[in-house]
Image (tube, rainbow, N blue to C red):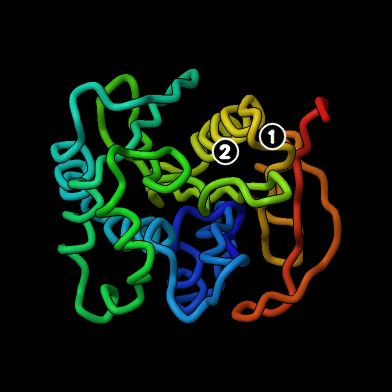
């Protein structure tokens, strides 16, 4: 599944089914390249949920923030706080989904989520929060823990009424920086539609390079982007 530019957990699938307007894709968050793709990963579904809730930011804030722990891990940028979501917050978001959307959430991922002793940045995802107002303007995260070849895939989405303000770039850069500072990660990847668009510009600003075209089982032809650590 591909995001417009970089997709938050699950955002791309639903966005693409609803319309092909490139402005709605930020970053691609692939559900599972290392496992079967019959279900979306939870993080991807949550991102898609945030996109569909974009018209009601208060509801998003209530579900994503009030259920989070007071001392949750945060990644900070110039204008944003990326707040690690608690298991309770994610389960509350899933509970708020329609039965059809809930059916797309991976049972295996849910089991891992419930079994996690504490929130994990590789699996739980982050709420994108404005520093000035505390409003939640999107969501972002990783597809999952680093793979055996030390690669992670990032995804994010920003509410439609908050796009064009650089928030997607800040969020993507923060996710990339955090990953590459980890000894577990050598490379960060993302996927976009096979054409220049807002997403590709975001990735370029964040230091990603275009590495070629790949065929996605669900989205067809997509562009793959990578950002590799200078340290081997």
* Element type at mark 1: loop
Q: In the image, which disc is placed on residue 172?
A: 2
Marks 1 and 2 in Cβ contact (< 8 Å): yes
Residue 214 vs 192, above or below: the answer is below
Residue 182 spot, x, y in % from top left: 61, 28
Residue drawn at 32 percent across, 39 percent down: 119
Q: How many marks?
A: 2
Residue drawn at 35 percent across, 76 percent down: 104
Indicate the quadrant containing the C terminus: top left, top right, bottom left or bottom right: top right
Residue 85 spot, x, y in % from top left: 30, 40
Residue drawn at 75 percent across, 34 percent down: 207
139 relative position to 68: left or right: right
Q: In the image, which disc is placed on residue 87?
A: none
Residue 168 spot, x, y in % from top left: 53, 40
* Element type at mark 2: helix
Q: Earlier in the sequence, mark 1 or mark 2?
A: 2
Residue 165 spot, x, y in % from top left: 50, 35
94 relative position to 160: left or right: left
Residue drawn at 34 percent across, 28 percent down: 130
Indicate the quadrant containing the N terminus: top left, top right, bottom left or bottom right: bottom right
Q: Residues within 10 Å of mark 1 (few under 14, many from 20)?
A: some
Q: Quadrant of residue 97?
A: bottom left
Q: Residues within 10 Å of mark 2 (few under 14, many from 20)?
A: many
Q: Quadrant of residue 231?
A: top right
126 relative position to 227: left or right: left
43 relative position to 20: left or right: left
According to the picture, the residue beneath numbered tag 1 turns out to be: 206
Alpha-carbon distance for marks 1 and 2? 7 Å
């Amino acid at each position: 599944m591909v995001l417009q530019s970089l997709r938050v957990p699950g955002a791309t699938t639903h966005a693409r089914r609803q319309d092909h307007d490139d402005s709605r894709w930020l970053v691609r968050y692939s559900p599972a390249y290392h496992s079967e793709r019959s279900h979306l990963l939870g993080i991807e579904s949550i991102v898609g949920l945030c996109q569909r809730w974009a018209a009601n930011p208060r509801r998003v804030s209530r579900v994503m923030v009030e259920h989070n722990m007071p001392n949750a891990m945060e990644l900070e940028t110039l204008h944003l706080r990326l707040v690690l979501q608690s298991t309770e917050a994610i389960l509350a978001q899933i509970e708020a989904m329609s039965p059809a959307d809930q059916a797309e959430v991976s049972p295996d991922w849910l089991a891992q989520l419930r079994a996690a002793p504490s929130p994990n940045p590789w699996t739980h995802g982050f709420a994108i929060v404005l520093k000035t107002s505390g409003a939640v303007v999107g969501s972002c995260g990783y597809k999952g823990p680093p793979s055996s070849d030390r690669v992670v895939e990032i995804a994010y989405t920003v509410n439609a009424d908050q796009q064009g303000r650089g928030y997607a770039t800040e969020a993507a850069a923060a996710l990339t920086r955090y990953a590459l500072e980890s000894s577990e990660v050598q490379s960060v990847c993302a996927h976009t539609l096979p054409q220049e668009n807002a997403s590709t510009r975001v990735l370029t600003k964040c230091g990603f390079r275009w590495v070629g075209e790949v065929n996605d089982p669900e989205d067809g032809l997509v562009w793959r982007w990578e950002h590799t650590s200078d340290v081997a």
